[in-house]
Amino acid sequence: MAAEQIAYTVKEFAPAVPGWLNKGDNAWQMTASTLVGIQSMPGLVILYASIVKKKWAVNSAFMALYAFAAVLICWVLLCYRMAFGDELLPFWGKGAPALGQKYLLGRAKVPESKHRGYNDVDDITEPLYPMATLVYFQFTFAAITLILLAGSVLGRMNIRAWMAFVPLWLIFSYTVGAFSLWGGGFLYHWGVIDYSGGYVIHLSSGIAGLTAAYWVGPRLKCDRERFPPNNVLLMLAGAGLLWMGWSGFNGGAPYAANIDASIAVLNTNVCAATSLLIWTSLDVVFFGKPSVVGAVQGMMTGLACITPGAGLVQSWAAIVMGMLSGSIPWVSMMVLHKKCSLLQKVDDALGVFHTHAVAGLLGGLLTGLLAEPDLCKLILPFDTRGAFYAGNGGVQFLKQIVAALFVITWNVVSTSIILLFIRLFIPLRMPDNQLEIGDDAAHGEEAYALWGDGEKYDPTEHGWHTSQFSEVAAPSPYVNGARGVTINL
């Protein structure tokens, strides 16, 4: 025992373990970062590849894969400090690389995060782990925002236009929302609540996705009318990774392994489960049977709705938010969408506007109503409460509305300008002849070694042939080609 104590003491004084480092917080934050990263890679890569028509599986997966890689490089070269660095404008930070050894090994700090007007309270965000941990954690949020946005333009966006769009949107749109609400911008200091990204991530991706879908244009008519998932079971696997990863998404928001993180994780799962059940129940009542795709959509609306207040509302309130997130986005998608000419005109492939913008906005407003004062004190230095708790709660609700309007306006304007600029050099939409083909035209690759999308099996065209005596011989599993061929008896 004595030897173990000596060894541990020596490690405590080692250069790799500075006095300010909290190993538990650092371990949890890196774990949370990994969980959020898994939501994108492979979570949304799998979900996108399987929820679309078979001919778009490769393209949809690649759009997510590319965004994850491109965002990381842009993040460390410029964008992290635009979102969490020193102030350049009230809504934007000064861009600079986050690659220096001294910078990354020093204690994490968000320099503009001290709330103004509270000089007697030292509330600057300064977690007990290195800057490298915070840089990577926030990268995973930036990456998933772009990948969620991609869901609106699947099945027709020119891949080269997407490759140009990702870094531009990250620089000119995402960093503005992140700095304004999280990094010490004007909305942060005004007291707007966005616990883990209901506005920065979900409202932004949903509004920007709808705007992008408008400028890119629609899919082919045949794809809009019939766009079945090519693998429902694989879609559930991707959705499962997304759900489980959300514990890191919201549980990592306090920047510490504290009691508020525990509340956030529980509330996240409670809201998601409630929303899924409500959405499924509505499908059964109005359509006669439960939809697996609908259940996944209900899960996602619940996760998006709880995000802005996960650690700030009581668990009974998480159930209320789940009931509303399982019903209001359902109505917007199933009823209002069919009655609104604008939504009918814009081809939002996966309904990101409904599942993220509507749900994220709903969550932000409900947080303004249901934020519990004692829970707010766990992470905020001043008296904050929802409107249901009287006091200054009504003002908080108004702040949530104003912040939502700013996020919506900025994303519509910035996304439009970026896409119109790209359109000067690269067509935003693939030509119709390539849209008819899909993955093979866009990448020269196909997801499955099977016959074309929508075709029926024909042994004279798709593989081996019957003999002249009408005897059917199955192909050897040891030769090239597709396996598991249907045999006509």
Image (cartoon, rainbow, N blue to C red):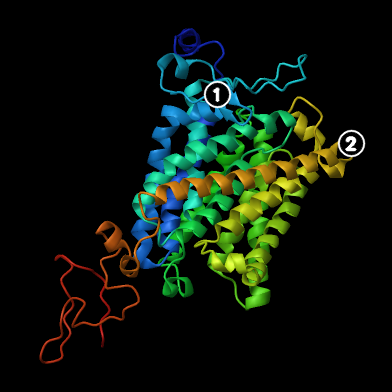
User: In this orientation, which residue lies closer to the viewer: 163 or 394?
Assistant: 163
Above or below 87: residue 432: below
Above or below 110: residue 102: above
Q: In the displayed orientation, state which residue is furthest to the bottom.
A: 469
* Location of residue 97 (image quadrant): top left
206 left or right, relative to 323? left
Coordinates of residue 255 in the picture (x, y in percent): 60, 28
Coordinates of residue 486 in the picture (x, y in percent): 27, 79
The residue at the point 57 percent across, 13 percent down is: 20
Q: Nearer the viewer, mark 1 or mark 2?
A: 1
Give the quarter of the figure containing the C terminus.
bottom left
Q: In this orientation, does residue 35 appear?
A: no
List the residue tagged with mark 1: 85
Which amino acid lies under the numbered mark 2 shown in the image of this protein?
Gly
The residue at the point 61 percent across, 48 percent down is: 203
List the residue tagged with mark 2: 391
Which amino acid lies under the numbered mark 1 shown in the image of this protein?
Gly
Coordinates of residue 163 in the picture (x, y in percent): 37, 46
User: In this orientation, which residue lies closer to the viewer: 217 or 227?
Assistant: 217
Mark 1 lies on a secondary structure that is: loop
Q: Earlier in the sequence, mark 1 or mark 2?
A: 1
Above or below 8: residue 478: below
Q: In the displayed orientation, state which residue is furthest to the right.
A: 390
User: In this orientation, which residue lies closer to the viewer: 454 or 217?
Assistant: 217
409 left or right, relative to 64? right
